[in-house]
Image: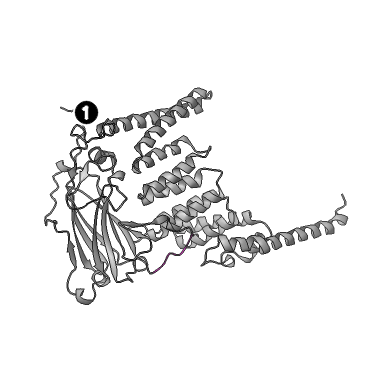
Amino acid sequence: MRSDINKPVWLGACAAGIAVCAALNQGVLHPLWVRNYAPKNLSVSSGLAPDQMLLALAGFREMVASILWVRADTYFDQGNYDAVLPIIRMVTWLDPKQIDVYSTGMWHIGYNFTDEQSRSDRRYLPSALALGAEGAKNNSETYEMYFETGWMWFHKINDQYDNAVTWFEKASEKSDIPPARRNMLSSAYQRAGQLDKALKLYYDQLNKAEISMKEQLDQVTAFTARQQRDTVEKNLDVFLVRMSQRGNFNADGTATELFDTQPPFDVGFSAEVSVIDAAVLRVRATWNVRPVGTRIRVILRDADYPNGTDAGMDFGASDSVNLDPPKNLTFMQDELFIRNRRADKKMDMSRDPTMYTFSKDKYYLDFYYNPRSAPPHIQDRFGFLGEGMTDKNYLNTTARNGERVIFHRMELTRDMLKREGEWIDKMPILRTPNFIEGSSTRTGEEELIKVPGLLNK
C-alpha cells in the first residue's frame, strides 16, 4: 500500500470521524447527561483540562475516566477528600460502567467525611445511597452495586432494616453473586424481623453448597465449596439453637418463662445532658444491663430537619447525588457505650462549625436503642425483636412502626447550645425525671460475661 497516496485520505477520514463524535457528544450525549446526571454545582469544563475535554468530545471518554481516576488516587493519599468528589462524579459520567468508582465513591462519601471526634457527616448519606442506586441502574447485569447499597443500609445506617433487605434481595437475584455475600441477606432478614425468611435462606444456601461441593472436581474449588458448606451449616445450627432458646419455636405463640427472654427485663434507662460550653455536651446515662455490649444512639438535629424522623432521618428520600450538602443544617450522631450500667461522655462539636452550624432556633436531642442490632449475647436475653426487653418509662413501639425500642427526646434551643442569651453564665442541664446522681464503680467482676461450658466448676 502506498502511504503517500493514502495518507491524505486517511487523515481526512480521521478528522471526519472526530468531527462526527464531537457533534454526537455535543448535540446528543452531553445534553442528555446534563439533564439526567450532571451535579447542579459542577460544570463539565471545571473538571477537565482542555486536552482532556477534547479527548472526551472526540469519543475517548473511557480513557479520560481512567486518567482522572488515577489522579484521584493522589488526592486520596494526600487526604484531600474534597477534591475527590468532583472526580468521582466526572468519572461516573464519562464511564458509567466503572463499578469500582461507584463503590469507592459510596464508601468515600459515606465514611470519609468526619468531624474532629471521628463522627461521620451523615448529611452526605442520602447522596451516597443515590450514587449507589445510580450505579446499580447503570450496571444492572451484576450484583455488585445492589450489594454495596444494601451494605450501606445494613452497616453504616443500621436502621430502617427493610431497605437493607430490599437491596440484598436484588443482589441475590444476580447469578454472579458469591455465596458468602448472599449469606448477608439472612442477617438482614433477622434485623428486619423476618426470621422465617432467614431460616429458609439458610436451608437454601446449605442445599446449594452441598450440591456445589459434590460437583467440584478440582481440589482448590472443592475445598472452597466445603468451606462454604461448613460455614452455612454452622450458621444454621447456631440460628436454630437461638430460635429455640429465645422461644421463637413456641407452638402456640405464647410467652412463658421457659425461654431465656422471659420475663421481659427492665433496662432502666435515664439520662442527663449538660451544655458545659458552647457546642459541647456532657451526656450521662444509666442502663440496668450489667454485661458490656450496649450502645445507645444519641442524635442531635434541627427540629425541622428535612425528612427528619424519631432518632434519625429518611436517608433514602433523595434520588439525586448532591456533592455539597446544605450548609445550614445540623445533624450529629454519636453513641454511648455502657460500662458498669452507666455512661459518661463529652460530645464536642465546637471545632466543626461548618458541620454543626446551629443556625436554627430549635433542636431535638434523641436517645434511641434498638435490640435488633444488638450483639448476640445481649439478644440472648432481649430476643431477636426485643420481646425480652422493656422499660417502664421509655419503651416505645411507634418510633419504628411497631418495633420495640427505647426512645426519649429532649428539646434544646440555639441559645442553650451556643451558651448565649440567658445561658451565658448559667449551664443548661436537662434530665429525665428518673435520673439518679451517682458514679460508676469498676470492680472488674461486673464486666465479665460468664458463659456455661464443660470446664466450669
What's the residue at 32%, 69% (across, down)? 358
Asked whether residue 324 is drawn in magenta, I would say: yes
User: In front here: 278 or 144?
Assistant: 144
Q: Amino acid at mark 1?
A: Gly
Image location (x, y in percent) of residue 85: 49, 60
Does residue 52 appear in the picture of this structure? no
What's the residue at 54%, 43% (across, down)? 142
User: In front here: 37 or 407?
Assistant: 407
Asked whether residue 409 is drawn in magenta, I would say: no
Please state if 125 lies on the left or on the right of 58 as rendered: left
Specify few, some or many for label 1: CA neighbours under 10 Å numbering under 14, 14-19, or 20 or more.
few
Image location (x, y in percent) of residue 443: 13, 45
Counting labels gives 1
Instruction: Work out which quarter of the rendered image holds the C terminus and state it.
Output: top left
Tell me: residue 27, above or below residue 110: below
Q: Which residue is mark 1?
A: 453
